[in-house]
Amino acid sequence: MRALRIQPEIAALSGSLVDEIVSASGLPRTAFWHNLFLKLLHHATDNLAHIAITFDHLAGLHGLPRAAELSLSNWCRSLSVRGQEQLPPTGPLLVVSNHPGVYDALVVASRLPRPDLRLIASDLPFLHSLQNISQRIFFIPINKGETYQRMGGMLSALRYLKAGGAVLLMGSGTIDPDPAVYPGALAHLQRWTEAVTLFLRFVPRTQVLLSAVSHIVSPKWAHHPLTWLAHAGLGKRRLAEVGQVLQQLFLPGSLYLEPCLSFSPILAASDLGDAPREALIQREASLLAEHCQEYGGFLT
């Protein structure tokens, strides 16, 4: 009976995903293009909609970390974790991570035993369709010209920290090189946002946890001929991400990843001096170097 009740939700969300794909392709959102893409991609979008709705339901029942842990089984076979320690059960906690893409936020969140965890994430219409998940996200518009709205998302996260909540921030706000398959992860840390300085300045009792994620992108897709269609590093990484996810959605069980995750010790604002962003970048660089020595990968 549950499957019958959820089917209309899957169809609606799948249709919404198709509309987003049409828009991302630069095509007009007409019935012709919607129906064409739906015919080509409905199997993948139906699967993703089902996974997303289940994830949303689990988040409502158990909170984001437990929902992330359960949902990772769709994409990953195992997860190696290094440096995990007892987190403060309450009080403001800022988790800052590199962002190799795909499901890295799920990987990090799955090992953070804070049911009050919320994310800072791009404002995608798809996420607004998920009631429990959308309540746990501080949305940042993708268009950098929307300064007021972007600042609004950050200020909401700041207020949540000040109230004692836990927040996960992907440091650069864009897709970083996965150090397991691409060089350049250390240099990409210089793109980290100044938001960490804002958070620690106005909520000085915030504790900070750094994380480093790798082995989130399949080597097959990192170097797939499809990625030759893009010239820039970011474009190639996006195409690899899309190809990998489409394979997993069209052919469930054909590809599982084994991500690796490292955590730093808990840091206090007083540990970071007068330039917290720069101090965090240096510490994340050290964490990434140790991570690559442990699990393999590019150190440059």
Image (cartoon, rainbow, N blue to C red):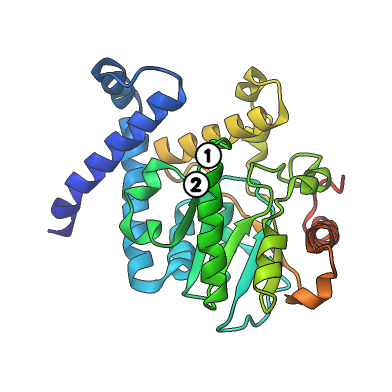
Q: Is residue 155 left or right of residue 45?
A: right
Residue type, label 1: Glu
Mark on residue 149? 2
Residue type, label 2: Gln
- Which quarter of the rendering shows the C terminus? top right
Q: Position of residue 249 (x, y in %)?
A: 42, 40
The residue at the point 40 percent across, 35 percent down is 250
Q: Nearer the viewer, residue 157 or 129?
A: 157
SS state under label 1: loop
Q: Position of residue 267 (x, y in %)?
A: 75, 75
Q: Is residue 256 visible?
A: no
Mark on residue 204? none
The residue at the point 56 percent across, 71 percent down is 161
Query: How far apart are labels 2 and 1 at the CA level?
Result: 6 Å
Q: Nearer the viewer, residue 89 or 261?
A: 89
- Location of residue 60 (image quadrant): bottom left
Q: Is residue 126 left or right of residue 101?
A: left
Mark on residue 146? 1
Q: Is residue 10 visible?
A: yes
SS state under label 2: helix
Relative to 108, residue 16 above or below: above
Q: Position of residue 197 (x, y in %)?
A: 72, 61
Instruction: Assess disc 1: are there few (<14), some (14-19) or many (≥20) residues with their C-alpha within 10 Å of its C-alpha.
Output: few
Count of numbered badges drawn on the protein: 2
Relative to 28, residue 14 above or below: below
The residue at the point 47 percent across, 75 percent down is 115
Q: Nearer the viewer, residue 172 or 32?
A: 172
Residues under numbered marks 2 and 1 in contact, where contact means CB atoms less than 8 Å apart:
yes
Relative to 135, residue 256 above or below: above
